[in-house]
Image (tube, helix red, strand yellow):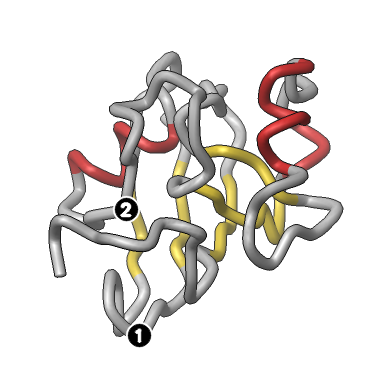
Amino acid sequence: MPQIVVLPHPTLCPDGAVIDARAGISLCDALLDSDVDIEHACEKSCACTTCHVVIREGFNTLPPAGEKEEDLLDKAWGLEAASRLSCQVILTDDDLVIEIPKYTINQVSESH
């Protein structure tokens, strides 16, 4: 069972979080299941970048991003070499430390 450490985010997770997730689900689902209300405007269909995260630890344990994800990531706010779309990261048994960027390119957030 992987452990996901979420670094503090001013709105979504001010104190940070430690999540015991289950392998085989998406990182986005693990966050949502643990009350970290990450945006996912396309309903996790790999059609936007609102669920963009930066993998601070454990990036090399993940399968590589697909071509569609790579193309979308080019449009993400605050893109870094270790950026991924959380809807496309399927958790393995490896632990991760993630950071949710402060902003997204989403002009309207339904939760705020």
Q: Is residue 58 left or right of residue 47?
A: right
Q: In this view, does 110 lie to the left or right of 93?
A: left
Q: Mark 2 — residue?
A: 38
Q: Please report the residue visible at 82 percent of the width from the left and 37 percent of the height from the top.
A: 60
Number of marks present in the image shown: 2
Q: Quadrant of the C terminus?
A: bottom left
The answer to which quarter of the image holds residue 62 is top right
- Identity of the amino acid at label 2? Ile
The answer to which quarter of the image holds residue 15 is bottom left
- Identity of the amino acid at label 1? Pro
Above or below — where is 16 with respect to 64?
A: below
Q: What element carries label 2?
A: loop
Q: Mark 1 — residue?
A: 10
| Closest to the observer, 46 or 94 | 46
Mark 2 vs mark 1, CA separation in Å = 12 Å
Above or below — where is 74 with respect to 106?
A: above
The x and y percentages for residue 110 are 15, 56
The answer to which quarter of the image holds residue 30 is top left
Mark 1: few, some, or many residues within 10 Å (few <14, many ≥20)?
A: few
Mark 2: few, some, or many residues within 10 Å (few <14, many ≥20)?
A: many
Q: Please report the residue visible at 48 percent of the width from the left and 62 percent of the height from the top.
A: 104
Above or below — where is 48 with respect to 19?
A: above
The x and y percentages for residue 51 are 45, 46
